[in-house]
Amino acid sequence: MRSNRLRTNADKTQLVWLGTRQQLAKLPLLSALIKPSSTVLDLGVNIDGQLTMDDHVTTLHWSCLFQLRQIRMVRSSLTSEAAMTLVYAFVSSYLDYCNRLLYGISDGLLTKLWTVQNAAGHVMTTEQGTLTTLLQCCVNSTGFWYGSE
């Protein structure tokens, strides 16, 4: 990099050590230009040192619920198709982005994602009893199911 006159920006560069809790505890503390952090943000995905995806799912959970609250505030003035479009655009796209990284996560994290899908279904439909059908339709279109049938 020095031959191209490029330098790292210590304020924008993030470093994370990957390993188990025991392996991470054995690492010596290095006084480097770039300090290791517990999580890093890479392409919109929060990655922690143990690859548990806990920080990513928590961030995803809260940002989706925020979007759903915003849609719910204007839901009475929207048609069903418009509400469905907004939920797909602002919530389903967040859930679908990098969802393959979520393979094998804990049941507690799956429950957080399930509550987002459930809340999205309630925002999209106002009729009683159609939520399960609506969620199964969403699964068929996205190909990823967070809950159990």
Image (spheres, helix red, strand yellow):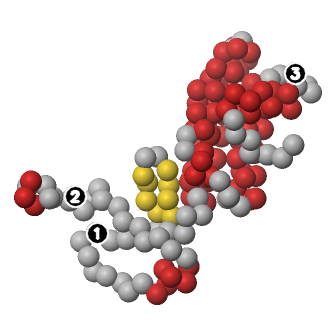
* Whether residue 122 is visible: no
- Residue 88 at x, y percent in the picture: 64, 27
Residue at coordinates 10% horizontally, 61% vertically from top-left?
A: 2
Q: Determine which quarter of the picture holds residue 67.
A: top right
Q: For label 1, count other residues whose C-alpha is less than 10 Å away and answer few (under 14), some (14-19) or many (20+).
A: some
Residue 34: image tag: 1
Answer left or right for 20 relative to 107: left
Q: Nearer the viewer, residue 17 or 58?
A: 17
Q: Nearer the viewer, residue 37 or 77?
A: 37
Q: Nearer the viewer, residue 74 or 145?
A: 145
Query: Quick one: quadrant of the N terminus?
Result: bottom left
Instruction: Please state which amino acid type lies under the numbered disc 3.
Output: Glu
Instruction: Please state which amino acid type lies under the numbered disc 2.
Output: Asn
- Residue 116 at x, y percent in the picture: 71, 41
Residue at coordinates 24% horizontally, 62% vertically from top-left?
A: 10
Q: For label 3, count other residues whose C-alpha is less than 10 Å away and answer few (under 14), some (14-19) or many (20+).
A: few
- Residue 76 at x, y percent in the picture: 73, 17
Query: Quick one: quadrant of the C terminus?
Result: top right
Question: How many numbered dots are placed on residues in this image?
Answer: 3
* Whether residue 94 is visible: yes
- Residue 54 at x, y percent in the picture: 61, 60
Q: Earlier in the sequence, mark 2 or mark 3?
A: 2
Residue 127: image tag: 3
**Residue 14 position (above or below residue 68):** below
Q: Earlier in the sequence, mark 2 or mark 1?
A: 2
Badge 1 marks a residue whose secondary structure is loop
Badge 3 marks a residue whose secondary structure is loop
**Residue 67 position (above or below residue 52):** above
